[in-house]
């Protein structure tokens, strides 16, 4: 028997002499350990690389011997006590051989903790935060399973407009709806360019691997980004970073070429610009509009996505849609293409049925500029309803900062009633919902009709609602002779009806609207002064005599897109093989450009002329005729 084992047995006998069973157990354990020591060790096949691990373990054992006299923490003591049996004896200061050896997992954890500490110390020395303020969370709450809350102490942080990046792209939403196989097959067809004659002839096509972006998924056949634009910080004020797009000095003349081609109504010159500079934003948006009016919606969407890809590649390192302190003012001319592309992309997502992705893009568009130059407030509630984000819509109406209360706007007054209706329906189906202290959906709809009675007649005509009961309701004086009261409110009502009329085709919402309208008629029979009170509220909220939203076209919020006949669009279209036959775009710079002959208007279809006038390069020669008259007078 070795001295170590003999010492252990004697110590156990001294501490517990009255327990013979424990002594016998200890003696049996000692005999078993002696047999194990006496038996020859088994020789097993070893990995030569284990020798390196043994050397590391020997070094760690030496370190443990040096620091063995240091006090042990309370958690380690508690952990060791829990491991011991009830009749065990406290160990001496000398550690056993098994305790000295560490497993590989422990070594990896210790190495990782040392690396993290060194990284934190470096970042602390450089005064750099490890995580941005929006992403800092309490690790204890994360471990305990609590809901992670964003630190909103930074000025300008708005959680209501925070964007979920996994919902930004349409492909993710379509995979949830149709499945990955269907979407992948469509994407493979899309990535194959239309002109595939070279592939049929056996010529191998070089496919680029564009960088990954948040807003769109670039196709493999797109050319590499030309780095023609970048973004810089204009100023930092009140916790917001204001950015602006700038052109690279080497390609600054491209914008001048585009302005010359636009003033000359020369679509071929714009195509020549794209042939050499395929990521010029305004040229891509021009062809996107042309494709849209020609009925080629997929080509139009591709041009818009290509524009967004180029503009996103030019982002500043501090600019991100996930940060709510980034501002991009519409007043800068170089920022306007980004707003236009985002709005067009949002409409394309809605056309494809990806309403949740459209909601995220709309939130991003609204957070860029508080002035809302594109009217995102007039369609964000529609996308929230279509994507079934009812509680988020109610929270948005309460927290979003605006000049007027959002429930006074026609779209929000009716959309909040619809959202409450679906929240109540989910509560009856068993889902937990706390709306006991809030107004019911019928009361909210009644308030909306009292505030904007003109909406009812426009919805009945636009949807249309063909039930005979609506005829009786519209015969009432309150609804039949309703007037908007101000040009701004009339324009807002027109936008709302054009954007939201499809929601009123659902039978349950028609019943809600009908019940609220009948309640309004009954209440007005008892007290007619209530209508006057709501008229005063409407006049106070929208008191301007001018149309404050005249810059927003009603057609921009419509699902229907006017199209021109192919024979009328043929003069505007450019064949794919004509790009290389055009003269270089640089030849147009600095040379006097002769505009095209003005188009004739007499004897043509008025509707066709109106649609044709929407194209930015069309000129009807009003000034041209005036100049000829002056020359004749001279």
Image (cartoon, rainbow, N blue to C red):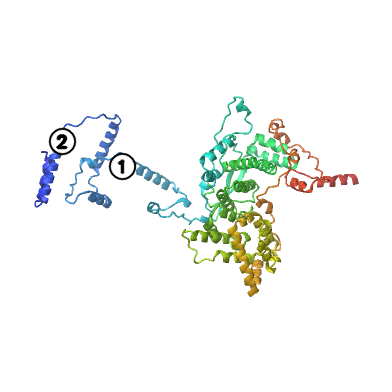
Residue indicated by mark 2: 37
| Residue under label 1 | 106
Q: Check the picture and name the quadrant holding the N terminus.
A: top left
Label 1 vs 2, first from the N-terminus? 2
At a point 58% along the width and 45% down the height, the residue shown is 232
From this view, report whether residue 105 is shown above or below residue 78: above
* Quarter of the rendering containing residue 396: bottom right
Local packing at callout 1 (Cα closer than 10 Å; few below 14, some 14-19, many 20+) is few
User: Which x, y percent locates residue 180?
Assistant: 51, 41
* Front residue of this view, candidates 386 and 322: 386
Q: In what element is the residue under mark 1?
A: helix
Residue 620 x, y percent position in the rendering: 79, 45
428 on left or right of 571? left
Viewer-nearest residue: 379 or 287 = 379
Q: Is residue 203 visible?
A: yes
Residues at marks 1 and 2, CA–CA distance in whole angstroms: 28 Å
Mark 1 and mark 2 in contact? Answer it, CB < 8 Å.
no
Numbered circle sitting on residue 94: none
Name the residue at the top extreme: 202
Residue reaching furthest to the front: 468
What residue lies at 79% left-to-right and 48% top-to-bottom?
606
In the displayed structure, 84 sits above or below 299; it is below
| Total numbered labels | 2
* Residue 92 percent across, percent down from the top left: 17, 47
Residue 188 percent location from the top left of the image: 56, 36
């Amino acid at each position: 028997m070795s001295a170590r084992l003999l010492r252990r047995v004697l110590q156990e006998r001294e501490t517990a002499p009255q327990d013979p069973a424990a002594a016998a157990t200890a003696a049996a354990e000692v005999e078993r350990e002696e047999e194990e020591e006496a038996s020859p060790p088994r020789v097993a096949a070893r990995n030569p690389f284990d020798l390196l691990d043994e050397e590391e373990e020997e070094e760690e054992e030496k370190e443990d011997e040096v620091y063995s006299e240091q006090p042990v923490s309370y958690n380690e003591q508690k952990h060791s006590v829990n491991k011991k049996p009830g009749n065990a004896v406290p160990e001496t200061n000398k550690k056993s051989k098994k305790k000295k050896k560490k497993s590989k997992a422990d070594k990896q954890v210790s190495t990782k903790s040392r690396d993290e500490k060194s990284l934190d110390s470096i970042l602390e020395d450089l005064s750099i935060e490890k995580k941005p303020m929006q992403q800092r969370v309490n690790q204890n709450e994360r471990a305990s399973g609590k809901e992670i809350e964003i630190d909103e102490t930074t000025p300008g942080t708005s959680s209501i407009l925070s964007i979920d990046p996994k919902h930004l792209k349409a492909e993710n939403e379509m995979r949830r709806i149709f499945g990955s196989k269907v979407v992948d097959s469509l994407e493979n067809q899309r990535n194959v360019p239309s002109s595939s004659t070279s592939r049929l002839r056996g010529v191998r096509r070089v496919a680029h691997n564009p960088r990954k972006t948040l807003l769109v998924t670039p196709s493999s056949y797109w050319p590499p980004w030309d780095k023609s634009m970048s973004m810089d910080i204009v100023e930092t004020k009140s916790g917001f970073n204001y950015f602006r797009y700038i052109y690279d000095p080497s390609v600054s003349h491209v914008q001048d070429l585009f302005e010359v081609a636009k003033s000359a109504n020369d679509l071929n010159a714009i195509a020549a610009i794209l042939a050499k500079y395929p990521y010029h934003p305004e040229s891509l948006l021009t062809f996107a509009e042309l494709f849209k009016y020609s009925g080629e919606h997929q080509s139009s969407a591709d041009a818009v996505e290509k524009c967004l890809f180029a503009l996103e590649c030019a982002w500043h390192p501090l600019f991100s849609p996930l940060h709510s302190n980034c501002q991009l003012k519409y007043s800068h001319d170089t920022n306007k293409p980004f707003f236009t592309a985002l709005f067009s992309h949002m409409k394309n997502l809605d056309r494809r049925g990806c309403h949740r992705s459209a909601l995220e893009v709309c939130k991003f568009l609204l957070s860029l500029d508080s002035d809302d130059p594109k009217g995102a407030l007039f369609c964000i509630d529609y996308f929230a309803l279509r994507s079934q984000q009812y509680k988020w819509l109610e929270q948005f109406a309460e927290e979003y900062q605006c000049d007027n209360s959002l429930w006074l706007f026609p779209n929000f007054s009716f959309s909040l009633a619809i959202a409450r209706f679906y929240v109540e329906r989910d509560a009856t189906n068993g889902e937990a919902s706390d709306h006991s202290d809030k107004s019911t959906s019928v009361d909210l709809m009644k308030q909306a009709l009292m505030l904007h009675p003109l909406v009812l007649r426009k919805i009945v005509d636009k949807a249309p609602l063909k039930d005979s009961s609506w005829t009786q309701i519209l015969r009432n004086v309150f609804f039949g002779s309703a007037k908007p009261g101000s040009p701004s409110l009339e324009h807002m009502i027109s936008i709302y009806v054009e954007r939201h009329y499809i929601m009123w085709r659902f039978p349950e919402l028609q019943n809600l609207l009908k019940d609220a309208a009948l309640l309004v008629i009954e209440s007005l029979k008892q007290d007619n002064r209530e209508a006057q009170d709501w008229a005063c509220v409407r006049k106070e909220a929208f008191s301007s005599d001018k149309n404050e939203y005249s810059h927003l076209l009603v057609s921009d919020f419509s699902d229907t897109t006017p199209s021109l006949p192919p024979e009328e669009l043929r003069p505007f279209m450019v064949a794919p093989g004509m790009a290389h036959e055009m003269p270089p775009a640089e030849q147009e710079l600095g040379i006097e450009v002769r505009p095209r002959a003005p188009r004739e208007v007499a004897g043509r279809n008025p509707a066709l002329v109106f649609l044709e006038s929407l194209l930015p390069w069309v000129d009807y020669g009003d000034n041209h005729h005036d100049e000829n008259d002056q020359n004749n007078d001279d």
